[in-house]
Amino acid sequence: MKHRELAYCGLFGAAALLLPVLFHLIHLGHIFMPMYLPLVTLAFFVRPGPASLTALVVPLLSGAATGMPPFYPPVAPAMSLELALMALIIGTVRVLFAHINTLMVLIPALVIGRIVNASLLYLFARLMELPAKFIAGVSLLSGWPGLIIMIIAIPAIVRLSRIPKGIEESKNK
């Protein structure tokens, strides 16, 4: 892993650990999905491997340290797999198609991720004899404000992070 990628993973990983704590203080964590924003954004800045690994580890670390997301019902493992998959999709598409529009990558990755999350929660709930349809349905419905925030914020963050060509050329001299 390159030093720059390590720094990005650390920065965005720390944000993904801190933001949920702040949002859960005002009981809005499950609605706005604050852990998702930094981890999905990270996939636009580093290669697929480091982004996926960070997205896989952070929800589990957060669950172990703070209890959010919980391990029972197994929300933390489902989130961990969902976020890792979304980071892998975004990172891989960005590597293969470097100039693709951010929204063209982001929206399908979010949709696939949410379907995977609901499917995993459904499966885990069935195995634990919990109301599977209810748990999967609540997961899908409660996160839509967070999805909207990501669709608005992530392209703006990616766009603002690009160095204008004149500045980039003067740095290389």
Image (cartoon, helix red, strand yellow):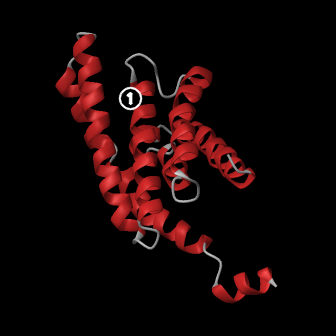
List x then y, in percent, for residue 170. Answer: 78, 86
Q: Secondary structure at mark 1?
A: helix
Quarter of the image that includes the C terminus:
bottom right
Residue at 58% x, 44% y is 50
Tell me the residue that label 1 is attached to: 78
Residue at the outermost front position? 96
Residue at image coords 40%, 41%? 85
**Is residue 102 left or right of 66 when viewed as pictured?**
left
Callout 1 environment at 10 Å: few (<14), some (14 to 19), or many (20+)? many
In the picture, residue 72 is in which quadrant? top left
Question: Measured along the vertical axis of the image, is residue 143 above or below residue 170?
Answer: above
Instruction: Give the percent coordinates (x, y) of residue 140.
Output: 27, 40
The answer to which image quadrant residue 127 occupies is: top left
Q: Residue at x 61, y 38 (%)?
A: 17
Residue type at mark 1 is Ala
Q: Decide which of 1, 158 is in the foreground and name it.
A: 1
* Badge count: 1
Judging depth in this view, the residue of 129 and 44 nearest the camera is: 44
Q: Is residue 31 left or right of residue 68?
A: left
Q: Tell me residue 144's x, y (percent).
A: 32, 50
Q: Where the N terminus falls, by quadrant?
A: top right
In the image as oriented, which residue stretches furthest toward the left? 133
Who is closer to the viewer here, 91 or 55? 91
User: Can you say whether 19 is above or below 41 in the image?
Assistant: above
Left or right: residue 135 versus residue 160 is left
Residue sitting at x 34%, y 66%: 104
Q: Residue furthest bottom?
A: 166
Picture coordinates of residue 7 (x, y %)? Answer: 72, 50
